[in-house]
Image (tube, rainbow, N blue to C red):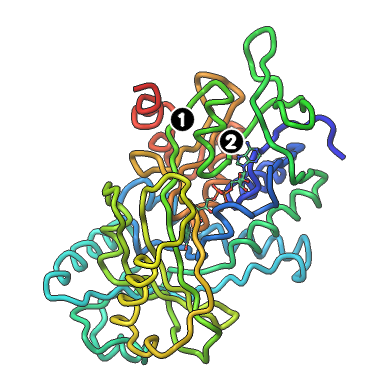
Amino acid sequence: VVEQADVVVVGAGVVGAACAEALSAEGARVLVLDRGAPAGGTTAAGEGNVLVSDKEPGPELELAKLSRQRWPELLATLCDELGPGLAHAEWEAKGGLVVATTADAVEPLTNFARAQRDAGVRAEWIGLAEAGELEPHLTKDITAAVHYPDDAQLQPVLAATTLLAAVRGRGGEVRSGVTALSVTTTVTGALGGVRTDSGTIACGAVVNACGPWSGEFSACAGAPIAVLPRRGIVLVTAPLPHTVAHKVYDADYVGAVTSDDVDLQTSTVVESTRAGTVLIGSSRQRVGFDETVRIEVLRELARKSVNLFPVLARVPVMRAYGGFRPYAPDHLPVIGEDPRLPGLWHATGHEGAGIGLAAGTGSLLADLYTGRRPAIDPFPFRVDRPAVVEEVSA
Ligand SMILES: Cc1cc2nc3c(=O)[nH]c(=O)nc-3n(C[C@H](O)[C@H](O)[C@H](O)COP(=O)(O)OP(=O)(O)OC[C@H]3O[C@@H](n4cnc5c(N)ncnc54)[C@H](O)[C@@H]3O)c2cc1C
């Protein structure tokens, strides 16, 4: 049992778990705290897509490429370390298929894919017949299609618990049901520990990985950052015979991801899971932490998915679930040490891509923590950028 840690990671979602794993791989004594159960927050609501296809060229795409490369390597390493029984995250490099369904959507999709190709993403324009071969149940009413061989999928809760199992296996600890209340400082003003509802833990560094609650925890720690919730809902069908092979989405999804609109947005994203269910996502709405499942949102998701896969009109829906994507106002993750309080680190704000981006985030944070030169430029993700710290004080 760790009584005193080098690093306390607050939040056992996939991002906290990835940071804890990467830090423990460096030899740090890591303690992970969560007020609920591990992976019980937003991570449990994620569909598990590990995507490069929906990111425009820029820092988030660089992090996505790093993460896409890192996930399978990491899972293979953990499989060796823990055995396949413990390290089983349903990793599947199934590829993504992005389709346009109107004449107007062809040019934006083509331009988007071209820019991504220039940024090193494998994006293949395919004909309508080929799209039909990849997805036999796809509507014939498509106007363009791009295949992204590097899009992948994993099961987010299993991925997080696998990472946490590695932390434990290296002598670290994971405590559930413990709420971090604030941090403590030493006489010199440096961070000295974390105060929880079951006592204070001395440590040299704290990582705020509280997902959509990161803004709240950062304020309690005296170094507020602007991270807010963006609601998302997913519909789940009953298990079906093999119906959808890839991750398939409508090109308007990218617009919804990057939009600043407060109102409801839905765009069709359809994929199957290993259990045979088909996940139909997803909505985006800023409603604070309101957990109401609205029927009009479900209806809209169902209607759009049937446009893409007419066969889904006849399948039963088993359930719907929702969660809160943690977003920063400039839609970029916040990864690094807080210059206002050295020793306080943040790894949050991954919005609708935290599962995909977790592996890269963990390695970036560990590189910064150990003073090693990171594989990608960390500057765009720094804590003290105006959108993250000035929006809070404004
Ligand atoms: C509907 C939907 C679909 C999504 N689909 C995908 C997808 O396909 N691919 C993808 O990459 N991303 C997806 N996402 C986004 C992804 O789920 C998130 O970006 C990711 O899970 C964030 O992980 P996290 O670890 O930062 O936060 P969380 O998983 O929310 O973890 C934060 C943890 O912190 C704990 N906590 C908070 N405050 C405290 C405190 N004071 N003390 C102790 N513990 C605390 C919470 O209990 C929680 O467990 C989706 C999101 C939604 C809502």
Q: Tell me the kind of residue under disc 1.
A: Ile
Residue wearing tag 1: 225
In the image, residue 365 above or below residue 371? below
Name the quarter where the N terminus is drawn.
top right
Mark 2 residue element: strand
Mark 1 residue element: loop
The one nearer the camera, 376 or 337, is 337
Name the residue: 54% across, 83% down: 238
Res. 124 image quadrant: bottom left
Is the CB of the residue bearing disc 2 within 8 angstroms of ligand 1?
A: no
Mark 1 to mark 2 CA distance (whole Å): 10 Å
The one nearer the camera, 47 or 173, is 47
Name the residue: 58% across, 21% down: 342
Disc assigned to residue 281: none
In the image, residue 355 above or below residue 122? above
Name the quarter where the C terminus is drawn.
top left
Is the CB of the residue bearing disc 1 within 8 angstroms of ligand 1?
A: no
Q: Tell me the kind of residue under disc 2.
A: Asn
Q: Residue furthest left?
A: 104
Residue 132 at what x, y percent from top left? Answer: 31, 90
Q: How many marks?
A: 2
Q: How crowded is mark 2: few (under 14 residues within 10 Å), some or many (20 or more)?
A: many
Residue 205 at what x, y percent from top left? Answer: 66, 28
In the image, residue 1 above or below residue 87? above
In the rendered structure, the answer to whether residue 110 lies left or right of residue 336 reads: left
Marks 1 and 2 in Cβ contact (< 8 Å): yes
Q: How crowded is mark 1: few (under 14 residues within 10 Å), some or many (20 or more)?
A: many
Residue wearing tag 2: 208
